[in-house]
Image (spheres, helix red, strand yellow):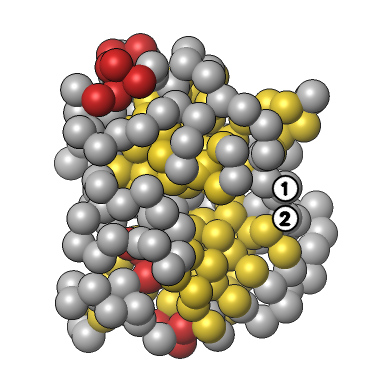
Amino acid sequence: MLAISMFGPANGLTIPTLSKRIVNGFLMPDVMAPYVVSLTKKVGSAFYICGGSLISPNHVLTAGHCVIDPSNNVVPGSNMTIGYGSKDKTQQKFVTGAEIFLHPNYINGNIRESMYDIAIIKIPTIQFDNATSKISIYDGPLGPNQNLMAMGWGGTEPNAIMLSMLRGVLVITGNTTSCLRYNAVYNTYDGPQICTLGELTPDHNTCGGDSGNSVVINSDNTVVLAGLNSVA
């Protein structure tokens, strides 16, 4: 199961650890996903990998658990490095975070039961171009068996090494009965958290390093942000 933290009527995908990867996905075409950014969080001598989405020239939307330390404190903005401008992480430009705003209803230490695994990172204003732009947030309904696309950087199978190229994968929303088997506090597929079931797309899912990354939907021929990777 992939849980998704949502915004408005339709929030995002959520993943449990900071080491998830797209499994059996596809390389994103050059014309897609100029809004996706990589995130590196520094805690002491350790580094953790996440992703996020540009929602303005100076704001990144990501998962709440991507901005906290092991003691469940929000890290300083300066501990977050944001990579943008390329789906190839080795070709990205970088800025350092300024401020971090964690959703006030986020439940520390329990991602699966947190319906609000969402945070915003304020960054220095960056210039938009063909390789860098924002994404709009979807405000329509979501139902069961809804096609979404999740994305992230990392290996193409569990325990594989992290790769530099952004990948995407089709995921499908489950219904309330199915999702309750995996999360006892799950509410509804159109609530603050939705889930996608691996059984609906066998061997195709997010897995590690994908936390906080975009989950999108095609709405009226426009790709918009439906949620964030949060828990797998």
Residue 88 vs residue 183, the one in the foreground: 183
Q: Image point 39% across, 55% down: which residue?
A: 117
Q: Image point 35% across, 78% down: which residue?
A: 74
Identify which amino acid the numbered label 1 is placed on. Ser
Per the rendering, the mark at residue 88 is none
Locate residue 7, reporting x and y percent.
Answer: 56, 48
Locate residue 98, reporting x and y percent.
Answer: 55, 85
Q: Are marks 2 and 1 in contact (CB under 8 Å)?
A: yes
Identify which amino acid the numbered label 2 is placed on. Lys
Residue 59 vs residue 21, the one in the foreground: 59
Name the side, left or right, on which 98 lies relative to 197: right
Residue pointed to by mark 2: 134
Locate residue 17, reporting x and y percent.
Answer: 24, 52
Q: Image point 24% across, 73% down: which residue?
A: 72
- Does residue 213 appear anywhere in the picture? yes
Q: Which SS class for mark 2?
A: loop
Residue 230 vs residue 204, the one in the foreground: 230
Name the side, left or right, on which 33 lies relative to 188: right
- Does residue 21 appear anywhere in the picture? no
Name the side, left or right, on which 11 lies relative to 222: left
Decide: is 147 above or below 217. above
Locate residue 168, reporting x and y percent.
Answer: 50, 33
Q: Nearer the viewer, mark 2 or mark 1?
A: 1
Decide: is 168 above or below 144. below
Q: Which SS class for mark 1?
A: loop
Residue pointed to by mark 1: 136
Decide: is 58 above or below 195. below
Q: CA distance from mark 2 to mark 1?
A: 7 Å
Q: Residues within 10 Å of mark 1 (few under 14, many from 20)?
A: some
Quadrant for the N terminus in the image: top left
Q: Image point 67% across, 39% down: which residue?
A: 138
